[in-house]
Image (spheres, grey):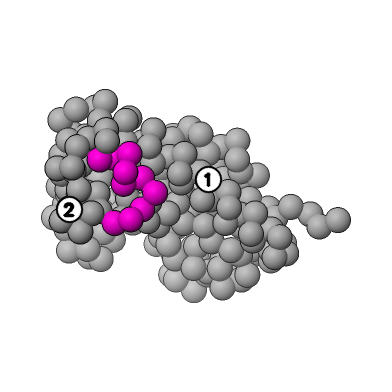
Amino acid sequence: MRHAALRIGLTGGIGSGKSTVARTLVACGAVLVDADAISRAVTAAGGAAIKEIAVQFGGTMLTAEGAMDRDRMRQLAFDDPTARRRLESIVHPLVSQETLRQYTQAAAAGSACVVFDVPLLVESGRWRQQLDRVLVVDCEEATQISRVMARNGWPRESVEKVIAGQASRTQRLSAADICLHNDGLPLEALDTEVRQLAARFGL
């Protein structure tokens, strides 16, 4: 009988280098399940969440194309904290369903390791029990800020606002089974560290 694939949860604050780590793990043979991409797909035009979003929030929350109006929804969630919870109660079960489907498919295909890229892994509280290990990519807040400003061209205030809305570094680290410190590491060194981890994950 085949072993189940190892389930690794990957998370880290904005600008921590999480996507780079994910790409390297995939290059080593892991299958990536991207919770963010799934969440975007279910709220896109024709997505599984659209009908219920229209029922709960009204048609004004949809764009002309029939996708969820992200900017409008973000503003509503900002003004009304219950709006975010209502939206999450629609979107989260659909994301869970699809991540499970992708995992089952990967395990059936004989993958040794499935990496769940979950931006809000620590915040959501519901992911932990679905994973074998949590891998946190960590760096100083100053590093995050300079990386995101350089990459996205955002002003410092915007980056700080995003960081403030995410789990704190302490919360993430306390949730970590494995921590990758990505501060002042050249890309080659990070690559080597990730490949060593990949070997531990059976890749």
For the point 45% across and 44% down, the residue is 94
Number of numbered callouts drawn: 2
| Three-letter residue code for mark 1 | Gln
User: Does residue 126 appear to the left or right of 87 in the view shown?
Assistant: right
* Residue drawn where x is 60% and y is 35% of the image: 129
Q: Residues within 10 Å of mark 2 (few under 14, many from 20)?
A: some
Query: Which residue: 43% across, 40% down?
Result: 92
Q: Secondary structure at mark 1?
A: helix
Q: Residues within 10 Å of mark 1 (few under 14, many from 20)?
A: few
> Is residue 14 in view?
no
In terms of image quadrants, where is residue 154? bottom left
Looking at the image, is 10 positioned above or below residue 92? below
Q: Amino acid at mark 2?
A: Thr
As drawn, the label of residue 63 is 2
Q: How far across and down, in percent of the image, does residue 5 sit?
A: 70, 55
Q: Among all residues in the image, which is located at the extreme right?
A: 1
Residue 174 in percent (x, y) is at 51, 35
Q: Looking at the figure, which quarter contains the N terminus?
A: bottom right
Q: Name the N-terminal-most of marks 1 and 2.
A: 2
Q: Residue at x 24, y 27 (%)?
A: 81
Figure quadrant of residue 73: top left
Residue 170 within the magenta-colored segment of the rendering: no
One can see residue 80 in this view: yes
How much space separates mark 1 and mark 2, taking CA atoms? 25 Å
Residue 28 on image: x %, y %: 61, 71
Magenta segment? 45-54
**Residue 97, disc:** 1
Q: Nearer the viewer, residue 40 or 121?
A: 40
Q: Nearer the viewer, residue 72 or 122?
A: 72
For mark 2, give the secondary structure: loop
Say which of 120 and 191 sits in front: 120
The quadrant in which the C terminus is found is: bottom right
